[in-house]
Image (cartoon, rainbow, N blue to C red):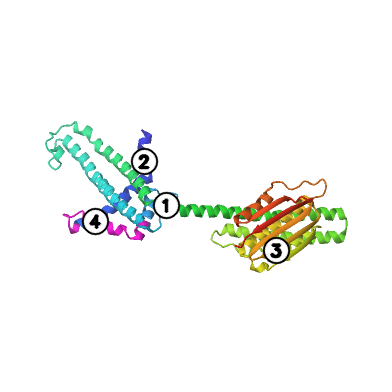
Amino acid sequence: MVRLLRPLFRGTTYTRLLHLWVPMLVVSVWALIDDTKLWVPAAVLVPVGFIPAVRTAEGVQARLLLTPGPEDSAFSVAPSATWQDRLRTVVWLELRMLLGALTSGVCVWLPILTVELVRLALGHRIDDIPVLRDAAPHWAYALLAPLPLLALYGAVVGLGVLATAGARAFLGPSAAERLSALEERTEQLLERNRIARELHDSIGHALTVAVVQAGAARAANSAEFTDRALTAIEETGRAALEDLERVLGVLREAEKPVSARPTLADADRLLESARASGAKVDADVTGPLETLPGPVSREGYRILQEALTNVLRHAGAVPARVRVEVADGALTLEVRNPLPDGRVAPGRGSGLRGIRERATLLGGRAHTGPDGAGDWQVRVELPPG
């Protein structure tokens, strides 16, 4: 019993009722002009439904009145973009008019029927309602008086549910809109993954340099070396904080474009950071780096950063050979280093996985592993963007 009465205490029941009454306001105004042609408002809705902005207005009303509360993505608020959208809007307008007429009818006549049943039970004769015209007054009609009110309650709730279902069917996103929403969601997920990779590469590189420098300074027991190590830790940490601040800024402002990301033109900073950590880096850069497309240059920087970080993390202060070659807009990036005895070669960590993911997203390829000559090799080939 409590469940049956629960809709009485929900605001949604009354906002849906209001939504169904709105079309009848137009009909009521037209009835004052010509009450012999009440079909005219329904006919006028056909050309009105073909106006693109009408779908937006109906979607907004459905969200506010049929499902008040949290925003319901089941109703589209975009203008009609295709003839199919326009036809769906027309069908919805006619359905809303029909449901509104039924709602107005039961809201007017069922309460009147209850009143007339009470009058009949009190001894009055009823001449205005055909079904009660021949009924003789009797007190038993008082027992039937609540039935129209119960029917009114059921009709209002049921018609509200029916209107909501119809709105979801005819005002819901079209196939093109659902595809667009799916693409947008995919782009958001890709952007989150990219940001996660950037944080991993930047912060991981800074922490690796700091750990290696601190360990080397303690082992060297030299004030001069300690001073250089602290300077390198400071510069690397400052660069990592800049990257972190930029990424957090992107997260705070979803519409803000990604900008000022480091490119291979800033590769010297990575090489000097690795050298300051004790690694002997021999770099060979050929070709015009400035001609690389932005995405290729930015991702190439991150790949180089992760490769050098892996050298310091897994091999320590060992000689590393870096080759960066640009030819016809394509990028070839290679990092080689020996693996000292007793050291474990990098396995399938997130760093190597990130290198391969970056290369794949740009249509390139990456090889990470032993080269057969006792060295560990990271080789990435990225096509022109």
Question: Which residue, given by chain and number where applicable, does mark 3 sit on?
Answer: 325
Most foreground residue, 167 or 69? 167
Residue 215 in view (yes/no): yes
Residue 33 location, x and y as percent? 18, 59
Say if the magenta span includes residue 234: no
* Mark 1 or 2, nearer chain start: 2
What residue is pinned by disc 4? 43
**In this rendering, position of residue 280 left or right of residue 69:** right
Residue 384: % across, % down: 61, 63
Amino acid marked by disc 3? Glu
Q: Tag on residue 175?
A: 1
Amino acid carrying label 2: it is Pro
Residue designated by label 2: 7
Q: Amino acid at mark 4?
A: Ala
Q: Position of residue 52 (x, y in %)?
A: 35, 60
Q: Residue furthest top?
A: 140
Observer able to see residue 207: no
User: Which is closer to the viewer, label 1 or label 4?
Assistant: 1
Q: CA distance from mark 1 to mark 4?
A: 28 Å
Q: CA distance from mark 1 to mark 2?
A: 33 Å
Q: Earlier in the sequence, mark 1 or mark 4?
A: 4
The local secondary structure at tag 2 comes to: helix
Quick one: which residue is furthest to the right in this view? 221
**Nearest-to-viewer mark from 1 and 3:** 3
